[in-house]
Amino acid sequence: MTTWCCISPNRVEKSGRVMNALARGWPDARAIIGPPPDDDGLFVCFGQIWLAEDLISKALPRGRRFLQVDNGFWKPSRGRPFGYYRFMYSRPDPVFATDDALLARRMAEGGRDLVPEFKPLRRKGTHVLIAMPGEEFGRAHGLAMRPWMDTIVDRVKAATKRPIRVRDRLAKTKLQDDLRDCWAVVTHSSNVAVDAVLAGIPVFVEPTSMAVPVSNSVRSIDNLEEPFFPDDDLLGTWWASLMCQQFTFGEMSSGVAHFFLSTIHGLARVD
């Protein structure tokens, strides 16, 4: 059965680069502009809105399988010819892969480009940083960001007397400036959580965050002054798991993305 790589008519150039690269390295895949045929085959869509929102909202009730592509968890491409794109299978968040052999293979094949520098766990800090999500995140999956955004500041204020900084998703200032001397980061599912973990800062996130395995839950925000810190083994497994779900254009074209995504999610071809 054909895997349909759907190019968004609203972002033909940007999504087209991704879908054409993926189609070259995915068996029996075809890049098309617009929605896939109604054949229940696996489809791939791009971003959070426009075509992706329409396709996902229709696919979920009927159980149709799909991959949703967005900017990478780390070193995101953001439309450039280099960097990474993430792939999420029929849900708004990545899975937590724990197959040691698979994780080791990804890190070995990815080379130094996938190896981060984890800073020592930070036990001191002054302010709490709230990183706001984009309102469109997860909308196709039935999530609503506005109620979260309207209440999170008051929830954090009730849990700590520390100064609070609020960072908008489209902030022009450097994230590293906000992370400097930061006690904890609170966010919904933003990539800021990844940067915070790398900086050794405890994070409080929602269940759809990529940082769930190494984080605290926003639902236990009362523990803001006594956060959980992950150990090195957990950090390493979590990181390799994320790297198994983000890829460059070259890795899409060569079949690397197909191998890891198929292995993790069981996306073997169905004839």
Image (cartoon, rainbow, N blue to C red):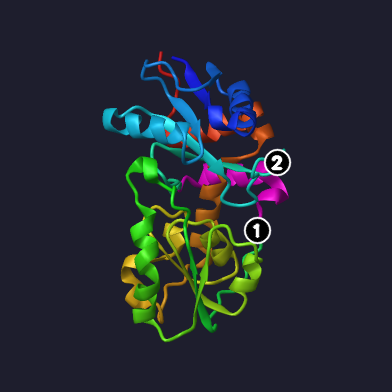
- Chain-order first, disc 2 or disc 1: 2
Compared across the picture, whether 64 is left or right of 8 comes to: left
On-image quarter of the C terminus: top left
Between 75 and 168, the one nearer to me in the picture: 168
The residue identified by callout 2 is: 80
Residue 107 highlighted magenta (yes or no): yes
Q: Is residue 238 above or below residue 130?
A: above
Q: Is residue 64 above or below residue 2?
A: below
Residue 255: x percent and y percent?
Answer: 61, 27
Residue 269 highlighted magenta (yes or no): no
| Magenta stretch bounds | 98-116
The residue identified by callout 1 is: 116
On-image quarter of the N terminus: top left
- Judged from the image, the secondary structure of the residue bearing numbered disc 2 is loop
Going by the numbered disc 2, the residue's amino acid type is: Arg
Q: Which tag is nearer the camera, tag 2 or tag 1? A: 2
Residue 71 position by quadrant: top right
The residue sitting at 33% across, 30% down in the picture is 58
Most common SS among magenta residues: helix
Residue 258 position by quadrant: top right
Q: Which residue lies furthest to the bottom in this view?
A: 161
Question: Which mark is on residue 262?
Answer: none
Compared across the picture, whether 1 is left or right of 155 comes to: right
Between 157 and 41, the one nearer to me in the picture: 157
- Please tell me how crowded label 2 is: few (under 14), some (14-19), or many (20+) other residues with Cα within 10 Å: few
